[in-house]
Amino acid sequence: MTTFNFSLLTGDTGPLVKGTEPDRLHIPIHAHTPILAAGDQVLAGTKIATANQPGEGDLHAPMSGVIKAITPDYMRIAVNGDERADATKPPADLGELKQWLREQGVNVGNLNQASRLIINAVPPEPGITIYDPLLRDYRKTIELGVETIQRIASTSKMNLVAAKGNRANAFANCTVMHVAPTYPNGLDQLVIKAVTKEEVLLGAHHKDAVLLSVRDLYFIGRVMETGRPVTETVMTIGTQNHLVRIGTPVGFLAGEAGATVQPGDRLILGGLMRGMAALNLEQGVNKDTTGLQLVRDDESIKATDSPCLGCGECERHCPARIMPGMLSRCSEFKFFERAEKFHIHSCIECGICSYWCTSQRPILHYIRLAKYELALLRTATSNLPTDTQEETGQQTGESE
Amino acid sequence: MITKPLQPILTVSVPPHAHCGRTIKGYMSETLIALLPAAIMAIVAFGMGAMRVVALSCAVAVLTEAICNKLTKREQTLDDFSGLHTGLLFAFLLPASAPWWLVTMGAASSIIIGKMIFGGLGANPLSSPLIGWATCRISWGDAMDTNTTMLMSELPAPLQQLKYFGLDSVETIDSISLLLGKQLGGLGEVQIAALLAGGVFLLIRRHIRWEIPVAFIVGVAVTAWIYQLIDPTAYASPLFHLLTGGTIFGALFLATDPASTPVGPIPTILFGLMAGIMVIVIRVYGIYPDGVPFAILLANLFTPLLDRIRPKPFGGAYQLTQEPEDEALCEKC
Ligand code: SF4
Ligand code: SF4
């Protein structure tokens, strides 16, 4: 892993490549409730599941085919063509527009009323270059997205935040801001901070600003343009950026890219710092997937349960100015409440602590565990979605 | 289920999937490398006696750690070299004349009450080798005294001479010979030049940071200078204090122990200053000629307090409330 560095420079990227059509799709649905059953026919664009979380977008079939199976985790569709469902027209009414976007699969969770729109064009992680081709070749679509958001959130000011050294041409009435091209400057919290000087905790919204990435705006623009739902994601695979249908198995993508996956390797959905390792080659990509990376068995970090040395390497690099080592100890020994005293909620989950840990402790994972336990502890009576709700969702899915 | 074994079986792990490449073993072995020149110099200066003490101390430390791990049914951790590291640091504090039982007792207590009793590596609130040193110094003070046990040697014992015979007795000792380790004291701690070289290596390799050593040295120098200003005929110069006893060894290797020292820039600087000042205070008023070990132990005690000096966390302090703030979410349902 010696070649890895934190640079967010994208350099020259080629045009967006349209992915080859797979013959099966495994659409992740653990945050959604399926509304169809196995055996049903779907067209490209048919709604297949509704979101459990308010504000989250619904799911639609990316291609036409037959639903073969529904499990709590994914829906398998055997593809048999590209026949499309009818497009719908965006409603003129603003209130309905937001709801309509949501039904078209757009995440509208943070489209609150605000005076400022922040466009995040800083690559989220090293090696992810998806914003570059979008900004270059799809300006019209993005502009349409920007207009839509300006109407919904009634923003009057606009900032485009880009990494210094990467291409970023402003839109009309838009101030461009540059941040240093190093990870983690592309994380939403730090981009908000760069613009507004205010620090917003992970999971909270800024009172007076809406942050959307170039990619979000591109998809919103596309939905407005075509009247068809979001069924794709933009991912960096190797050095190229691809438009990939959600549910495309990672093994298929790896094969297309010419990589042979050996036993013990990791296929990472997203970037190396925050991405999720695929369970197997058949796992499908979802709407937020930004990249696919192959990490060979011998070059990957193996998390240990070694003790924390107290060396403070993690603390020196933590952008949230907290003590990751201490938090990981609290979590390790199940002192979750204590973790709160060490400001666990300030963590923006960048993973930098684990990158630097001398002990190679899975610090970020410990922190997430503690956050999860705290949420369970504090909101046991609330209606936050927990495992039980997911189970209900799954039951309805199966009974239908 | 997605979990049925499909070939090839992939590794599933938590992010991040990249790492800087540092390991405990790497840290320990590079620290050992940094100590090597001083160890060689010690053997050159004190002969086989030094070799015997070093070897015995390391062996006892490693063995004790293995036995502790066995008794407490923990995984064996010998391959991270941390036992060896503690053993070597402890040996550096001993006179080359130390009898075998003293070395054994000290090395064992460094490991047992300095480290394992608190939960092993990384959990020690005080510097482990210094615990062993303190145990020996308090229990068998005579055997630990370099001056009385090395009467045959022609080398000066600057700190003892300063304490018992006054400033005049050390005027003749020149700084260069002190720098080259021509003095009595802990066998490794007096190899000033070699230790400095090792410290620079650790700084370059970023295993230690500049804050603690620099603050420590500044603390020693400034305090010594103040005393000298008060009475130049009674108190030795800052340079003398820096080049004698364990000042450099303490600043570079003992006060930079990861577990027992604070982290942030302000806490580390305060920590270093505090330890440095205490060195001179103990050397001037204490009953022990060299104040370095006790000064560092004392500063270690302040680590939890110093660690409370923290910058404001990102987004301010926040507690998850019992009443979930769900209204914003529910509006949208
Ligand atoms: S993931 Fe680690 S480094 Fe990043 S904010 Fe959280 S504690 Fe700090
Ligand atoms: S980097 Fe790892 S070993 Fe060092 S303090 Fe942080 S968690 Fe502990």
Image (tube, coloured by chain):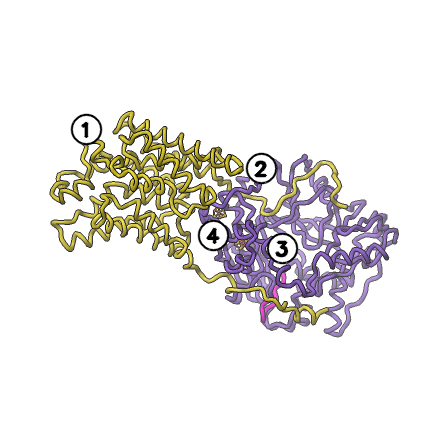
Question: What residue is disc 3 on?
Answer: A131
Chain letter behind tag 1: B
Q: CA distance from mark 3 to mark 1?
A: 76 Å
Q: Would residue B295 be visible to someone looking at this image?
A: yes
Query: What residue lies at 56% left-to-right and 44% top-to-bottom?
Result: B18
Chain letter behind tag 4: A
Locate residue A78 relative to residue B121 in the image: left or right: right
In percent of width and height, residue B116 lies at: 45, 41
Q: Quadrant of residue A138?
A: bottom right
Q: CA distance from mark 4 to mark 2?
A: 25 Å
Query: What chain is the purple one?
Result: A
Question: What residue is disc 1 on?
Answer: B152
Is A210 contained in the magenta span? Answer: yes
Query: What chain is the yellow one?
Result: B
**What's the magenta region?**
A205-213
Question: What residue is disc 2 on?
Answer: A299
Question: What residue is disc 4 on?
Answer: A315
The kind of secondary structure element at disc 2 is helix
**Neighbours of disc 3 within 10 Å: few (<14), some (14-19), many (20+):** many
Q: CA distance from mark 3 to mark 4?
A: 31 Å
In this view, the mark in front (4 or 2): 4
Tell me whether the residue at label 3 lies in contact with that at label 1, contact meaning CB atoms closer than 8 angstroms.
no
The kind of secondary structure element at disc 4 is helix
Image height check: is A113 above or below A301? Answer: below
Residue type at mark 4: give it.
Glu
Residue type at mark 1: give it.
Met
Q: Does label 1 lie on the same chain as label 3?
A: no
**Neighbours of disc 1 within 10 Å: few (<14), some (14-19), many (20+):** few
